[in-house]
Image (cartoon, rainbow, N blue to C red):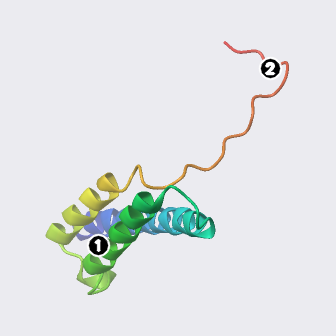
Amino acid sequence: MENVQHEHKKQLHDRISERSAQLNMTLAGLQANPRSASRERARAIEEALAALQTHLGGGWDSIDEQESAALTRWLDSSRFLFDAPPTAPPVAGAVQS
């Protein structure tokens, strides 16, 4: 049972780390353009990152089931705030099935 909780915690940690990096990168891009019409989006990202810091205030070792559930909800609520990485353009002459 302890191993399952540890694996879940590690997966959650990895997902949180990745999302935090994505949000920070998107925020930096928004802040780089002071005339950006995305002030509300930047504020939403800042608020999401602040909420994350509140959840992680005691460190990863203190994450219990309740906090884990809150972090999972945070992942869900922040999923549309970051910019997706650019996708590669389709290859010319590629056959689509």
**Residue 12, image x and y in percent?**
35, 64
Q: Amino acid at mark 1?
A: Ala
**Residue position marked by numbered label 1 in the rendering:** 51
Q: Is residue 87 above or below residue 58?
A: above
Q: Which mark is residue 31?
A: none
| Nearer the camera: disc 2 or disc 1 | 1
**Residue 62, image x and y in percent?**
24, 83
Q: Residue at x 52, y 62 (%)?
A: 22
Quarter containing the N terminus? bottom left
Number of other residues with Cα within 10 Å of mark 1, as a class: few under 14, some 14 to 19, many 20 or more = some
Q: Residue at x 76, y 15 (%)?
A: 95
Q: Quadrant of residue 96?
A: top right
Q: Which residue is outermost to the front?
A: 35
Q: Is residue 44 above or below residue 58?
A: above
Q: Which residue is outermost to the left?
A: 66
Q: Which residue is outermost to the top?
A: 97
**Residue position marked by numbered label 2 in the rendering:** 94
Q: Is residue 96 above or below residue 80?
A: above
Q: Quadrant of residue 25?
A: bottom right
Relative depth, front residue between 84 and 10 = 84
Question: Do tag 2 and tag 1 residues touch (Cβ < 8 Å)?
Answer: no
Is disc 2 placed on a helix, strand or loop? loop
Q: Is residue 15 visible?
A: no
How many angstroms separate mark 2 from mark 1 (CA)? 45 Å
Q: Is residue 3 left or right of residue 24?
A: left
Q: Residue at x 33, y 79 (%)?
A: 53
Relative depth, front residue between 75 and 12 = 75
Q: Amino acid at mark 2?
A: Ala
Q: Is residue 68 visible?
A: yes
